[in-house]
């Protein structure tokens, strides 16, 4: 019998397979799609490196950087061009730069806040007074991101800062997402300082000085990490197909794959929670129900390539976010060549648009022509961009981003408790301890470490 079966060949499953195989364990990796990597897919078009899914990861979380170095890609690591980091937010139909010094929705510089046309005077005054807020006397209950931000900075800060930022990062709705599970750091700052502004300023002073970039990625795109991992899976049996059921053995598990049953002592399910839920329906109906409750949002990316000479005016900054209050189709747009080097050839501009998100899955059902027309209409309205793109690439990601809604931590504690009843069963992926690439890698590493121990 093999040591481990892993279902799902995204970055979570691949990291677990790599870590276990390196330690000499016999591993079978089952992936439904022809290509490994899950959401990490990179395309080459018109000389550009196009990320169909994620485009980078947070540098502050070391797990991804560590893995990249370990698989020999240290020289390919690049940071975002933070010296030209300006993000615009749509307000009254126009793009307004986010005030300098804003960390998520926390202001840390006075003058840019005073002069920004993004927010009204009552909100600016309220954001300034937040500085004097005292720490809470009692433990505060879990709240949604919207409730939390409204309480500190008011509704306008929810509409024009928290909502567009969370839609761009989590494809989520701040009215549903839990502040405790998505932005834990802010809850800690509130507990310690009362004021998020004072807390952020204080923790910034404690941080070591340095000019490290906020985001990192790979020169050739994130799929290079998938390729490097795949090349380092000695002896790992890779089977293509959809695992359809799981059952107990006396000393492990059996997985159904295309009419065959495969046995292993350990089973790692590295799929989205809704897929894990289906697999566990017979084995543990309670766990099945808990996993079914993890919401997922659906999103898509639309990359458009233009000749620089066709742009009405040069692109500046990293891109823009569109708040729900003013949204027609686009949620966000990245000016790829401005954010990262090595992405576009001379004379070409690449715009990567993000569509969909919580409550807006219907856009994925539209035809490519409809999506292109709606995307271009938004770009014309916001950037005055009337030129025809020289190429485009559309990627749909149905039910791909886990939503840590209010109650997530409690549900995860129950998931842990139920999973412990099944020795040798492990759940990893973006549904549990963080949706970012570094979070997924870290959970996969910890899980592999537990199996090896
Ligand atoms: C559009 C988009 C942009 C994002 N941007 C960023 C970003 O910039 N930075 C960042 O850090 N994170 C980003 N994320 C989040 C991040 O990409 C994901 O959380 C992470 O890649 C999830 O990896 P995973 O391996 O857990 O899951 P997945 O990549 O979803 O892999 C799961 C795999 O399981 C397979 N599978 C499912 N069911 C079965 C079955 N029954 N049998 C066999 N195989 C099965 C699937 O085919 C898939 O390959 C983004 C996500 C999306 C959707």
Image: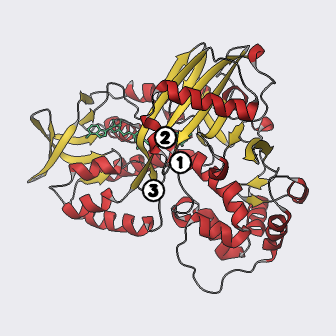
Q: Residues within 10 Å of mark 2 (few under 14, many from 20)?
A: many
Q: Which residue is mark 3?
A: 433
Secondary structure at badge 2 equals: strand
Question: Relative to the observer, which residue lies in front, 440 or 169?
Answer: 169
In space, the residues marked 1 and 2 are separated at their CA atoms by 7 Å
Left or right of 171? Residue 279 is left
Residue at which label 1 appears: 171
- State whether label 2 is within 8 Å of ligand 1: yes
Residue at image location 63% in from the left, 28% down from the top: 376
Real-space Cα distance between discs 1 and 3? 17 Å
| Residue 355 x, y percent position in the rendering | 55, 39
Horizontal arrangement in the rendering, residue 377 relative to residue 94 (left or right): left
Q: Of the residues under marks 1 and 3, which one precedes in the sequence?
A: 1
Label 2: which residue? 299
Quadrant of picture, ligand 1: top left
Callout 3 crowding tier (Cα within 10 Å): few <14, some 14–19, many ≥20: some
Q: Is residue 419 visible?
A: no
Query: Which percent across, then down, holds residue 340?
Result: 68, 29
* Along the viewing direction, whichever of 138 and 386 lies nearer the viewer: 386
Label 3 vs label 2, nearer the camera = 2
- Of callouts 3 and 2, which one flags the residue occurring earlier in the amino acid sequence? 2
Q: Secondary structure at mark 1?
A: loop
Assess whether mark 3 and mark 1 are in contact (beta carbons under 8 angstroms).
no
Residue 424, by quadrant, is bottom left
Q: Is residue 346 visible?
A: yes
In screen coordinates, is 232 left or right of 55? Answer: left
Q: Ligand 1 closer than 8 Å to the CB at disc 1? A: yes
* Contact (Cβ within 8 Å) of mark 1 with mark 2: yes
């Amino acid at each position: 019998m093999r040591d481990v079966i892993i279902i799902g060949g995204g970055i979570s499953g691949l990291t677990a397979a790599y870590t276990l195989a390196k330690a000499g364990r016999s591993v079978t990796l089952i992936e439904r799609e022809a290509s490994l990597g899950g959401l990490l897919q990179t395309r080459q078009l018109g000389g550009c490196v196009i990320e169909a899914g994620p485009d980078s990861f947070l540098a502050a979380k070391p797990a991804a950087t560590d893995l990249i170095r370990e698989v020999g890609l240290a020289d390919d690591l690049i940071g975002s061009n933070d010296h030209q980091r300006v993000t615009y937010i749509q307000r009254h139909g126009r793009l307004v730069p986010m005030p300098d010094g804003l960390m998520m929705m926390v202001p840390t510089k006075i003058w840019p806040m005073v002069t920004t046309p993004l927010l009204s005077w009552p909100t600016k005054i309220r954001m300034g007074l937040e500085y004097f807020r005292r720490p809470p006397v009692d433990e505060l209950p879990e709240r949604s991101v919207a409730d939390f931000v409204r309480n500190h900075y008011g509704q306008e800060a929810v509409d024009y800062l928290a909502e567009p930022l969370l839609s761009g990062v989590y494809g989520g709705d701040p009215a549903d997402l839990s502040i405790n599970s998505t932005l834990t750091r802010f809850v800690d700052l509130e507990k310690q300082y009362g004021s998020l502004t004072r807390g952020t300023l204080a923790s910034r002073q404690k941080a070591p000085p340095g000019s490290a970039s906020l985001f990192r990625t790979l020169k050739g795109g994130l799929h290079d990490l998938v390729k490097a991992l795949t090349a380092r899976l000695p002896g790992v049996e890779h089977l293509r197909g959809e695992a359809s059921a799981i059952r107990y053995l006396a000393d492990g598990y059996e997985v159904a794959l295309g009419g065959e049953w495969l046995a292993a002592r350990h089973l790692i399910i590295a799929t989205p929670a809704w897929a894990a839920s289906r697999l566990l329906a017979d084995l543990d109906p309670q766990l099945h129900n808990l996993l079914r409750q993890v919401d997922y949002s659906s999103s898509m990316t639309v990359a458009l390539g233009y000749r620089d000479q066709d742009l009405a005016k040069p692109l500046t900054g990293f891109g823009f976010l569109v708040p729900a209050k003013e949204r027609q189709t686009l949620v966000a747009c990245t000016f790829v060549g401005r954010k990262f080097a090595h992405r576009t050839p001379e004379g070409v501009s690449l715009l990567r648009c993000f569509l969909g998100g919580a409550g807006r899955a219907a856009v994925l059902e539209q035809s490519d022509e409809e999506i292109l027309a709606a995307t271009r209409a938004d770009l014309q309205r916001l950037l005055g961009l009337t030129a025809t793109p020289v190429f485009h690439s559309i990627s749909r990601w149905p039910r791909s981003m886990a939503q840590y809604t209010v109650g997530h931590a409690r549900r995860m504690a129950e998931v842990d408790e139920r999973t412990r009843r099944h020795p040798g069963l492990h759940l990893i992926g973006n549904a549990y301890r963080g949706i970012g690439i570094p979070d997924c890698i870290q959970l996969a590493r910890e899980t592999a470490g537990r199996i090896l121990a």
